[in-house]
Image: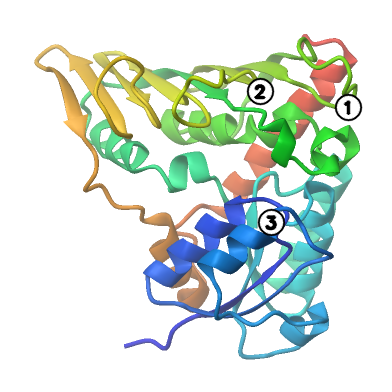
């Protein structure tokens, strides 16, 4: 039996660090320490979840420890590329929260770092990797349940939760823009389910419709994607109403030549209770699936990749391509919106 992978966290500024660490612990890996700058708003929740994990005063304590294999990063988005490059230069693999970076120049630097060091730079796209219904959808698609996938429609509404947001959340340069940030999830799902290695951003738009007092906040965004394999539409926003019992009614529709799958990931409004609702419709079946028992294989696969130097959790080129497309969509949206 292999020894546990020893991992540490650098940067706790987004709540996604909770899931990153919890899932690595759940598969038997060892959380050995953490560092963050200042006292982020997520710190109280982190300490409740991981009260026995020691905080270190200097990042170098973790980076210089040769027994640490993996660094988890959920720093302010604009700092994530530098944190990852620093970790890889110290011989560590990286699992970062999305977005992995906020500019194309940062992405180029990350590509060079991976090439120079041979380390893994992986993004925990939590709306795929931490959602059991997406695992089940992938199994059904692979089994041919809806034929050839030709389109995805990904909706990513979020609740603003203004009172809990740090100042960087309202700073365009700090978070990278709404398409760079939230929509990277839906870009990931489009490439994955259509089996595309590349795509064209045909249209992109961003706006601030509801928060004029925060000019740095983009509260609406959309993308149209085209690839040799399929088409995609993405809509993201910060408009989730207070009455919804969760942070957002995230949905994914996967259209195939012989049927379709709809995922109601976090809530089924006025329908069945709970999360992870999957509806399959094809020529033989029209049914709802209970996905509670579906696995979340990304974390075990990443651990295996760290041990074996493989790419089973997510191809490295996929992490780069998702990030590139989200950044290009952000750039296009802010330049006027329509591609070739």
Question: In this rendering, does residue 178 appear at all?
Answer: yes
* Nearer-the-camera pick, 335 or 132: 132
Q: Secondary structure at mark 1?
A: loop
Q: Position of residue 109 (x, y in %)?
A: 84, 55
Q: Position of residue 277 (x, y in %)?
A: 29, 28
User: In the shown orientation, is residue 50 left or right of residue 277?
Assistant: right
Cα distance between the residues tagged 1 and 2:
13 Å
User: In the shown orientation, is residue 330 left or right of residue 46?
Assistant: right
The circle on residue 258 is: none
Tell me if mark 1 has few (under 14), some (14-19) or many (20+) residues whose alpha carbon lies within 10 angstroms of its own.
some
| Circle nearer the N terminus (3, 1) | 3
Q: Position of residue 321 (x, y in %)?
A: 65, 40
Q: Secondary structure at mark 3?
A: loop
| Circle nearer the N terminus (1, 2) | 1
| Quadrant of the rendered image containing residue 263 | top left
| Residue picked out by circle 1 | 216
Cα distance between the residues tagged 3 and 2:
20 Å
| Circle nearer the N terminus (3, 2) | 3
Q: Residue at x 61, y 47 (%)?
A: 319
Question: In this rendering, does residue 121 appear at all?
Answer: no
Q: Quadrant of the N terminus?
A: bottom left
Q: Residue at x 42, y 31 (%)?
A: 193
Q: Residue at x 38, y 86 (%)?
A: 2
User: In the shown orientation, is residue 225 left or right of residue 135?
Assistant: right
The circle on residue 238 is: 2
* Nearer-the-camera pick, 60 or 284: 60
Q: Residues at badges 1 and 2 in contact (C-beta under 8 Å)?
A: no
| Quadrant of the rendered image containing residue 150 | top left
Q: Secondary structure at mark 2?
A: loop
| Residue picked out by circle 3 | 74
């Amino acid at each position: 039996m292999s020894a546990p992978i020893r991992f540490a966290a650098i940067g706790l500024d987004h709540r996604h660090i909770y899931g990153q660490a919890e899932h690595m612990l759940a598969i038997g890996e060892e959380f050995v320490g953490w560092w963050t700058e200042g006292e982020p708003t997520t710190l109280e929740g982190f300490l409740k979840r991981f009260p026995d994990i020691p905080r270190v005063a200097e990042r170098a304590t973790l980076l210089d420890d040769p027994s640490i294999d993996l660094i988890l990063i959920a720093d302010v988005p604009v700092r994530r590329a530098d944190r990852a490059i620093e970790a890889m230069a110290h011989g560590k693999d990286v699992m970062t929260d999305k977005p992995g970076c906020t500019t194309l120049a940062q992405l180029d630097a990350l590509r060079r770092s991976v090439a120079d060091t041979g380390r893994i730079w992986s993004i925990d796209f939590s709306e795929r990797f931490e959602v059991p219904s997406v695992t089940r959808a992938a199994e059904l698609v692979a089994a041919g349940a809806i034929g050839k996938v030709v389109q995805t429609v990904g909706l990513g509404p979020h609740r603003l939760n203004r009172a809990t947001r740090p100042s960087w959340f309202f700073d365009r340069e700090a978070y990278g823009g709404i398409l760079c940030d939230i929509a990277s999830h839906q870009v990931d799902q489009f490439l994955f389910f259509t089996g595309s290695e590349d795509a064209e951003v045909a249209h992109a738009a961003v706006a601030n419709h509801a928060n004029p007092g925060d000019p740095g906040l983009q509260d609406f965004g959309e993308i149209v994607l085209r690839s040799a394999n399929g088409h995609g539409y993405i809509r993201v926003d910060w408009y989730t109403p207070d009455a919804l019992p969760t942070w957002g009614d995230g949905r994914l529709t996967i259209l195939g030549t012989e049927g379709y799958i709809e995922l109601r990931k976090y809530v089924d409004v006025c329908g069945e209770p709970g999360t992870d609702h999957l509806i399959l419709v094809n020529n033989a079946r029209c049914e709802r699936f209970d996905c509670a028992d579906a696995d979340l294989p990304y974390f075990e696969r990443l651990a295996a990749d760290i041990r074996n130097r493989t790419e089973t959790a997510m191809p490295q080129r996929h992490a780069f391509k998702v990030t590139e497309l989200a950044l290009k969509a952000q750039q296009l949206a802010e330049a006027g919106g329509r591609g070739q």
